[in-house]
Amino acid sequence: MIGAAASTAVPVAWLVARAAGLTALLLLSSAIWLGLAMSLRLFPPLRQKSILVWHQSLMWCGLGAVALHGVALLLDPVMRFSLPVLLVPGIAPWRPVAVAAGVLAAWLMLTLALSFHVRRRLTQRRWRLLHYAAFAAFACAVGHGLTAGTDMRGTTGLLVAGGAIAPSLWLVYARILVPRPVRA
Amino acid sequence: MRGVWATLASVWLLFAVLAVLAWTRQQPATQAPVVVVHGKNGQLLVPATAGTTHATTRTSPVPAG
């Protein structure tokens, strides 16, 4: 009876870890879409400031989801991850490359989110170069999801990854090809 | 204020994903078979997988002599 109860118990930490990981990916994707849309000036000038606030807030919320993802993995009795494994890329005993991609994505996201607060101290060129790290963070996050994520296998994984990547690719394509409108 | 809205939307998104994952969690396909043992104090349900199957019965050798 005890064995049966243990086998059918709800793995709360595991469910929270998976949900937080997927949520973090969705929030990071949304933040990138908004950033690219702002860069393309798809929104009216009066809305740019509010969109910027949404862009920053979604990034911080994504980081919150990443933190929850890590805490849930620490509490999971099956995975048994330690704090150094979640902070240092490449030392995980389970799928080290896949986990390292996730850790790297989280560090890049944190750097980008913090950079908003030192924006005035950076030159425009450095700010732009730093923002290119968002693409690396996005690629690492999607790669981490596809290689380590339980819920991103098979068709579901392709749909989630495609749903995250396709708008980003379209916006990057437009950003490269469409000339930026000159401000009056 | 927009930050608060973004936080609320993120929390709701997290709950929605959590609900979907919990809802689609695979349940055990069938209930484990049990063996009903009738004893003095009533019947007792014993999981059929609890014990090992019997080995082939081995006949004792016929004593010599």
Image: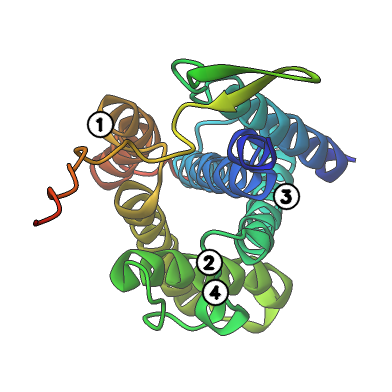
Q: Secondary structure at mark 3?
A: helix
Q: Residue at x 36, y 38 (%)?
A: A152
Q: Crowding near pointer 1: few (<14 within 10 Å), some, many (20+)? A: few
Please say whether residue B50 is visible from this viewpoint.
Answer: yes
Marks 4 and 1 on same chain: yes
Q: Earlier in the sequence, mark 4 or mark 3?
A: 3
Marks 2 and 1 on same chain: yes
User: Looking at the picture, which amino acid does disc 2 mark?
Assistant: Ala
Q: Residue at x 17, y 42 (%)?
A: B59
Distance between the alpha carbons at the discs numbered 2 and 1: 25 Å
In the rendered structure, find residue A174 and report the number of the disc placed on it: none
Of the pair A10 and A16, the residue shown nearer to us = A10
Of the pair B46 and B62, the residue shown nearer to us = B62
Q: Chain of mark 4?
A: A
Q: Secondary structure at mark 4?
A: helix
Q: Earlier in the sequence, mark 4 or mark 1?
A: 4
In the rendered structure, find residue A106 and report the number of the disc placed on it: 2
Which residue in the rendered view is the most extreme toward the right?
B1
Q: What residue does disc 4 label?
A: A86
- In contact (CB < 8 Å): disc 4 and disc 1: no
Instruction: From the top left corner, tell me how far across and down residue A5 is, in percent.
Output: 68, 36
Q: Secondary structure at mark 2?
A: helix
Q: Secondary structure at mark 1?
A: helix
In the rendered structure, find residue A154 and report the number of the disc placed on it: 1
Q: Quadrant of the N terminus of chain A?
A: top right
Mark in the foreground, 4 or 3: 4
Distance between the alpha carbons at the discs numbered 4 and 3: 24 Å
Q: Earlier in the sequence, mark 2 or mark 3?
A: 3
Mark in the foreground, 2 or 1: 1
